[in-house]
Image (tube, helix red, strand yellow):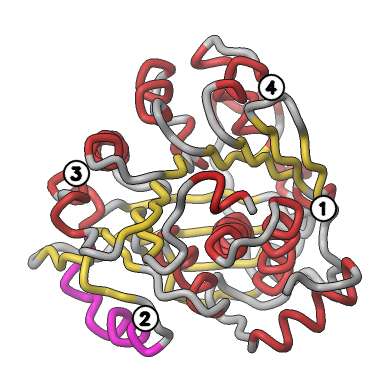
Amino acid sequence: MFAEKLGLNRQGQVIVTGSIAFDNIMDYPGSFRDHILADKAHVINISFLVERFKRQRGGCAPNIAYTLALLGSSPRIVAAAGSDFSDYREWLAEQGVDVGGIRTIHGEMTATCFITTDRADCQITGFFPGAMREARNLSLAELAGSRAALAIIAPDDPEAMMRHCAEARSQALPFFFDASFQVTALDGEALACAADGAMGLFLNDYEFAVFQQKTGKTADQIRAEHELVVITYGAEGSEILLSDGGTVKVPAAQVTRVVDPTGAGDAFRGGFLAGLMRGHDLAACGRMGSLAAVFCIEEYGTTSHCYTEQQFLTRYRHSFGDAPA
């Protein structure tokens, strides 16, 4: 099993760092591209009348941790939140997430995201960092706790991401670097530095292209530096690039309806890591990630979905055949 090959303590905790936020999610019933004129992009001034609005719990760290908890893990979040976080903290604890590593920044609001999605699932997002800006002052080494077995450094304040990667290296804590949307905020030197020593990377296909362009590294060079590089392709599935040159192709799980794509990438990561900590092979880990993402996009919001492990296994068999033990 790959977890044993990597020497992971499967009885330990997955430490999840990343943003904590409230998501304001809006649906636009048309297509953005119908209203954006290329020759007027320099003076763009557009208002979209949305047909649905909902305020949701969000943020990369809780999204990932929630999926891990649904799949029987007890992840620990290390992140910064604002003075308006108390109800959210209580809810996370009720779901089985260890909130002992979350620090409240008094006098600050929790980070807030404004996401508008059109009918083609294209998105326009605005993000207010709020308390997330203080994440750079949090020490992963101090807050990870005594049971840390594996960490995922998810999108957060860029300086916090750099610090957490450095501390994971210094503590010899295996970690995944998940640059995600912060691949645009970090320059090539910072991306290469953060990824240095990471067990693996999580990126979608666009982010992987940006990562290559900014760092000046080829796909083969990147895969040689990590045990695995997980690249997602949305409805086309995903692939896992291995350091030995091998590639694991993973099909997408079957979708019954697409309601809201927000948070699908985070759910994928949670499902993948849950499979890894259970000792499954990489193909099964990828399929668990894909199915976890499907559960997410079939409901409105990033943590509105819910399922039992038995319901997850039933749909896994429906999509892929036999489920992992």
- The Cα–Cα distance between marks 2 and 3, rounded to whole angstroms, is 22 Å
Which comes sooner in the sequence, label 2 or label 3? 2
User: Start and end of the magenta stretch?
Assistant: 80-94
The answer to whether residue 291 is seen in the rendering is: yes
- Numbered tag placed on residue 235 in the rendering: 1
Residue type indicated by callout 2: Leu
In reply to whether residue 65 is colored magenta, the answer given is no
- Report helix, strand or loop for mark 3: helix
Which of the 4 image quadrants contains residue 306? bottom right
Residue at the spot 71% in from the left edge and 32% down from the top edge: 37
State how far apart marks 3 and 4 are (Cα).
Answer: 40 Å
Mark 3 or mark 1: name the one nearer the start of the chain.
Answer: 3
Q: x, y (%) of residue 218?
A: 63, 13
Q: Secondary structure at mark 4?
A: helix
Within 10 angstroms of label 2, few (less than 14), some, or many (20 or more) residues?
some
Q: Position of residue 61 (x, y in %)?
A: 40, 61
Ranked by sequence position, the earlier of labels 4 and 2 is 4
**Does residue 48 appear in this view?**
no
Mark 1, residues whose alpha carbon is within 10 Å: few (<14), some, or many (≥20)?
few
Numbered disc 2: secondary structure? helix
Task: Classify residue 215 as left or right of residue 77.
Answer: right
Say if mark 4 contacts mark 2, CB within 8 Å: no
Residue named by callout 3 = 136
Q: Which residue is found at the position 68% from the left and 26% from the top?
A: 244
